Image: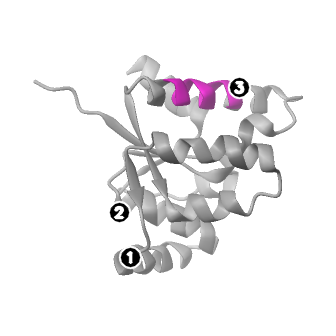
Amino acid sequence: MEKMIIRVYLDNCCFNRPYDNQNTTKIKNETRAKLQIQKQIRTGMIDLVWSYVLEYENENNPYLNKKREIRVWKDIAKDYVDQSDELIVLAEDISSTGVKNLDALHLAAAITSKCDYFITVDRRILKYRTNRIKVINPVDVMEEWNNG
């Protein structure tokens, strides 16, 4: 029996976590876990999904070096999600629960592309619950994968 490849969507704040001030244990741990996830993506153990929303948000990053380094992941991703009517309708539904519009678009992109996990360090997004995707912090997902 073939092993199923896990599909993940990392949101923009997760991609930017290594560039944040690393003075707290929480941020250091999230950075380590995020880098471990990226390592597994590079080795083909996990499929990354990229979207037009990530592209938009990254292109508006004022820090050129961060923008360039994050942009590389678009080419590494196994799938690209473009805007669609289905995605917009789903994002509107998600934003009606109190999720910010841009975050709702990220979530909708991950859900419509059938990702297993939406990985974020944003505490507000981590509160969003649905049976369509697991919304999780990078530290928690690594713990889950290592103990599962």
Circle 2 residues within 10 Å: few <14, some 14–19, many ≥20: some
Q: Which mark is residue 29?
A: 3
> In this orientation, which residue lies closer to the viewer: 131 or 78?
78
Can residue 112 be spotted in the picture? yes
Q: What residue sits 79% from the left and 50% below the top?
A: 64
Mark 1, secondary structure of its residue? loop
Q: How is the image coloured?
A: one colour
The alpha-carbon separation of the residues under discs 2 and 1 comes to 10 Å
Q: Which mark is residue 112?
A: 2
- Residue depth check, mark 2 versus mark 1: number of the one nearer the observer: 1
User: Which residue lies under the disc numbered 1?
Assistant: 84
Task: Identify the amino acid type marked 2.
Answer: Thr
Side (left or right) of 16 relative to 97: right
The alpha-carbon separation of the residues under discs 1 and 3 comes to 35 Å
Circles 2 and 1, Cβ within 8 Å, touching? The answer is yes
Is residue 96 covered in magenta?
no
Can residue 121 be spotted in the picture? no
Mark 3, secondary structure of its residue? helix
Circles 2 and 3, Cβ within 8 Å, touching? The answer is no
Give the residue furthest to the top.
147
Image quarter of residue 26: top right
Task: Identify the amino acid type marked 1.
Answer: Ser
Magenta range = 31-39
Side (left or right) of 70 relative to 46: right
